[in-house]
Image (cartoon, coloured by chain):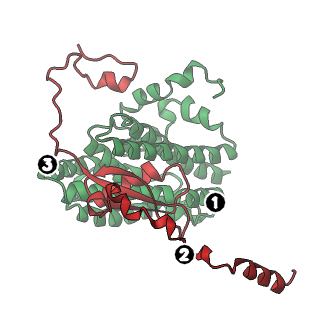
Amino acid sequence: MTIQSLDPRVTRAAIPQENETEMAPIPPLDQLESYEVFHLETRGDHPVHVGSLHAPNPEIALLWAKEQYGRRSRTVSIWVVRTEDISVISVEDADIFATTPEKDYREAKGYRVGGKITAYKRQNTTEP
Amino acid sequence: MNDTAALRDLLLRMADDELIIAHRNSEWTGLGPIMEEDIAFSSIAQDKLGHSLGLYRILESLGGAEPDAVAFGRSEGEFRCCQLVEYPIGGYDFSLMRHFLHDTAELLRYEMLERSSFEPLARLATKIKGEIKYHLFHANTWIAQLGARGSEESHARMQSALNEVFPLALGIFEPSDYETELAAEGIFPGEAALRGKWLETIAVTLEKGTLILPSLDAVTPAYGGRKGYHTEHLKPLLDEMTEVFRIDPSAEW
């Protein structure tokens, strides 16, 4: 007996009802490379990491990334990069950054000229 | 009114090709070789369905019936698609090769039509250009991949698919009774011109895939579809495709 399905394609495929061979796990290395996908919504945007996918090579990674990450939202460009090629500072080492929030003297907000700039601009803007 | 007859014939050929190949390619949905590829091929099929709708709408504006009635209400003999698109999906090698040979012709045809004197068609051609560009990017990538960068088996299977599909694909360019009129009116330069460009273009990609095109003298183009003569595969496809529509043709969706 083969599988009879509401989906005519499945019925046509004449798949035996009983699994003749035991389901075996796939060998651990029998899989495609992993790629990270970056998405640009408008020209000149920074690429934003949107997810990852498996593919045999960069060209096919692009083919598939277009459909998986570029088919619903506005897109002008997609980047893919082999996950292996990305070097990271591990989250485990986040203590490297622990005191950063205290160093606010490094931030531009430390300069108190914002108000003066706004006032200057207002003075020098000619009404249309 | 002869002009309209020529135009309607051209539009119907194109629309029926798009509809039937869309349906065939959609048969891979859920059964594709790998999930990501399944998504890509299904999305391409959906685009093609959209192209056929665009063309049926133009036909409607020329006084034809509404798109659903034309797509789902005709008998086999009224279809003007080429036989290439009717064949069952076969293996993924066959489906990919058909996709490549069909979509190269499709891209070149719409490039020609962007300059058509018939504005609705020129507008549609411009609108869907990007979609077809991706379809061909998909097809070309796979031809190069499986032809030249895969295994001995993948190369052999793509070559044998090419030998099988090439004569069918030549059926795309079956001359119509209106070639002279369409060219004279600046609507479409003609099937022969398109075929010439197509042969040049596929040669470049096939070389990248180290695949060899059978000699033109050795094959017989699968003509007949454009005149309503179809293979035994079209009828069962239409029965399946229209099954739900026929339950209640006036249903609102």
Query: Farthest residue toward the left?
Result: B152
Above or below for B107 versus B82: below
Mark 1 packing: few (<14 Cα in 10 Å), some, or many (20+)? some
Q: Are marks 1 and 3 in contact (CB under 8 Å)?
A: no
The CA distance from mark 1 to mark 3 is: 47 Å
**Which picture quadrant has residue B142?**
bottom left
* Amino acid carrying mark 1 in the image: Phe
Q: Which residue is mark 1?
A: B118
Residue at (60%, 34%) from the top-left corner? B68
The CA distance from mark 2 to mark 1 is: 66 Å
Q: Chain of mark 1?
A: B
Quick check: B245 left or right of A116? left
Disc on res. A105: 2
First of labels 1, 3 by sequence position? 1
Q: Is A11 in front, or is A37?
A: A37
Q: Colour of chain A?
A: red
Question: Can residue B211 be seen?
Answer: no
Question: Can residue A39 be seen?
Answer: yes
Above or below for A10 versus A53: above
Question: x, y (%) of residue B64?
Answer: 66, 40
Question: x, y (%) of residue B209?
Answer: 23, 60
Residue mark closest to the camera, 2 vs 1 = 2
Q: Is B46 in front, or is B77?
A: B46
Q: Is B23 in front, or is A113?
A: A113
* Amino acid carrying mark 3 in the image: Glu
* Amino acid carrying mark 2 in the image: Tyr
